[in-house]
């Protein structure tokens, strides 16, 4: 038998076969389904049409509220109500009410719902985040999710695999988000569509788990089916300390076949931004330095984790947010929020003139907690900068690292963060 990639091994195990090849169609057993209020609301109709009145046996289902928290209008409040009623009706024990969880792609790893070698599906593109823990995260439509909830299975065409090897060491002031934006610039939004992306190499081992989640999160913007990094001791210790369920690490064979293999030297990556209005519109910060900003946003499922808040707080010590700029800080979860409080980070943000919100996707998705007006410019740590993403269609959004975002908030314009670190 020829060597198997991670994707082939995952789909072979999940479909009860010894071996699968790229292009095979499989009906795979799902380990975990994640639902937030957006997906839960929309999945009700296909669930009813399928006649699924109960959840499949041995399926872990996690339900939470994160996109619009607290509900900013009656439409959001209705979605919250439907989600609460669904969780209660279906007997979901892993249900996180507003104020008790946070943003899904932070809450699931930190609460131990993500484990190496498992298949996770969700009606959310950034489910790729879980690849940082060696899990295969698949985004799906609500009909696929309804089938997974009722049967415990989902269908998939086994994708071709692409390998990216990250080598070298990051410069001071350069972080995982800069790596992610650089990869976006290299591959764009379509060249890896429906591929399974494996990211390996010594630079991965030097990244924190927060940084790995940032990179895997952003890779969703390339259109990949899923992305994964090899679980190492740091990853296994993280999962073992949070999950009570056993797990088995899965990884590719040495002689596995890839459609493409690329090498990227991260030591050559400068502080990077994605200019309006595509995540792949990457350029060195130096090309846009001096661009005036009205708002800086630190948060989202990409960069609202504790290491992101620590980096920003270190830079804000002894500085204040520019008088013409509003800095919005959104911790990714209640656990992150509490940790930031315990470490004094929240005080640092407030004393520097920042606005700290509760955990929510609000500002990132243009729902609430930080919308932009016509003509305004925002630099954000989030993952999308499409036209109208954060409010007005006449606003500009630059994507950047926590370091570049914080330095720009202090300066009042986009600047290279290396002068602040």
Image: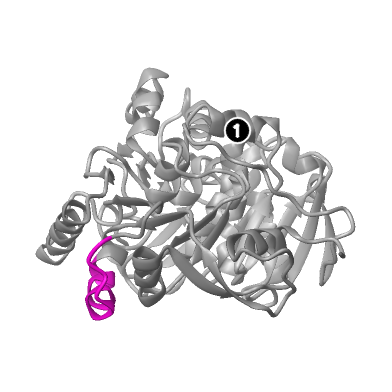
Q: Is residue 249 above or below residue 143?
A: above
Residue 287 visible from this viewpoint: no
For residue 257, above or below residue 213: below
Residue named by callout 1: 420
- The answer to whether residue 402 is seen in the rendering is yes
User: What is the residue that sits farthest to the right in this orientation?
Assistant: 255
At mark 1, the secondary structure is: loop
**Residue positioned most to the left:** 74
Dominant SS type (magenta): helix
Residue 124: image location, x then y, percent: 42, 64
Chain part drawn in magenta:
41-54
**Image location (x, y in percent) of residue 297:** 41, 49
Instruction: Specify the quadrant of the image occupied by residue 207.
Output: top right
Q: Residue at x 37, y 41 (%)?
A: 329
Which quadrant, please, contains the C terminus?
top right
Residue 195 x, y percent position in the rendering:
68, 71
Classify 315 as above or below 394: above
> Measuring 51% from the left and 60% from the top, which residue is drawn there?
398
Count of residue discs: 1
- In the image, taking residue 256 as reference, residue 365 lies left or right, namely left
Q: Residue at x 60, y 52 (%)?
A: 131
Image side of residue 178 versus residue 138, left or right: right
- Is 125 placed left or right of 417 in the picture? left
Residue at coordinates 81% horizontally, 53% vertically from top-left? 165
- Between 26 and 350, the one lying in front of the other is 26
Please state, as top left, top right, bottom left or bottom right, where the N terminus lies in the image: bottom right
Q: Is residue 98 magenta?
A: no
Residue 134: x, y in percent? 63, 47
The quadrant in which residue 355 appears is: top left
- Residue density around tag 1, few if under 14, some if 14–19, many if 20 or more, within 10 Å: some
The reply to whether the magenta stretch includes residue 48 is yes
């Amino acid at each position: 038998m020829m060597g198997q990639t991670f994707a082939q091994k995952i789909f072979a195990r999940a479909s009860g076969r010894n071996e699968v090849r790229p292009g095979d169609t499989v009906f795979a057993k799902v380990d975990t389904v994640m639902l937030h209020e957006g997906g839960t609301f929309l999945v009700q109709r296909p669930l009813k049409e399928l006649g699924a009145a109960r959840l499949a046996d041995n399926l872990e289902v996690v339900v939470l509220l994160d996109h619009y928290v607290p509900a900013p209008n009656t439409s959001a409040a209705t979605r919250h109500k439907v989600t609460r009623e669904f969780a209660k009706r279906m007997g979901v024990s892993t249900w996180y009410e507003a104020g008790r969880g946070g943003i899904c792609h932070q809450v699931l790893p930190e609460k131990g719902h993500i484990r190496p070698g498992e298949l996770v599906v969700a009606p959310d593109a950034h489910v790729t985040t879980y690849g940082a823990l060696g899990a295969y995260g698949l985004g799906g439509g609500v009909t696929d999710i309804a089938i997974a909830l009722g049967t415990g299975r989902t269908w998939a065409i086994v994708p071709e695999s692409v390998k990216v090897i990250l080598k070298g060491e990051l410069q001071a002031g350069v972080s995982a988000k800069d790596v992610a934006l650089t990869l976006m610039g290299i591959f764009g939004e379509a060249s890896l569509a429906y591929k399974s992306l494996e990211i390996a190499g010594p630079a991965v081992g030097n990244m924190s788990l927060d940084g790995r989640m940032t990179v895997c999160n952003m890779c969703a913007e390339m259109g990949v089916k899923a992305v994964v990094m090899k679980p190492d001791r740091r990853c296994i210790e993280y999962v073992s300390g949070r999950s009570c369920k056993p797990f088995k690490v899965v990884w590719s064979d040495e002689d596995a076949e890839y459609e493409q293999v690329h090498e990227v030297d991260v030591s050559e990556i400068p502080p990077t931004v994605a200019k309006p209005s595509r995540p792949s519109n990457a350029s060195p910060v130096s090309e846009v330095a001096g661009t005036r900003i009205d708002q800086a946003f630190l948060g989202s499922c990409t960069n609202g984790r504790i290491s992101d808040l620590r980096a920003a707080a270190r830079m804000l010590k002894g500085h204040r947010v520019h008088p013409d700029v509003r800095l919005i800080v959104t911790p990714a979860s209640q656990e992150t929020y509490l940790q930031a409080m315990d470490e004094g980070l929240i005080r640092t943000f407030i004393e520097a003139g920042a606005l700290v919100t509760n955990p929510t996707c609000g500002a990132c998705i243009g729902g609430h907690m930080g919308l932009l007006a016509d003509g305004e410019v925002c630099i954000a740590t989030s993952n999308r900068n499409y036209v109208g993403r954060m409010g007005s269609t006449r606003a500009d959004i630059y994507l950047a690292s926590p370091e570049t975002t914080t330095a720009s908030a202090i300066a009042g314009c986009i600047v290279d963060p290396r002068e602040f670190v």
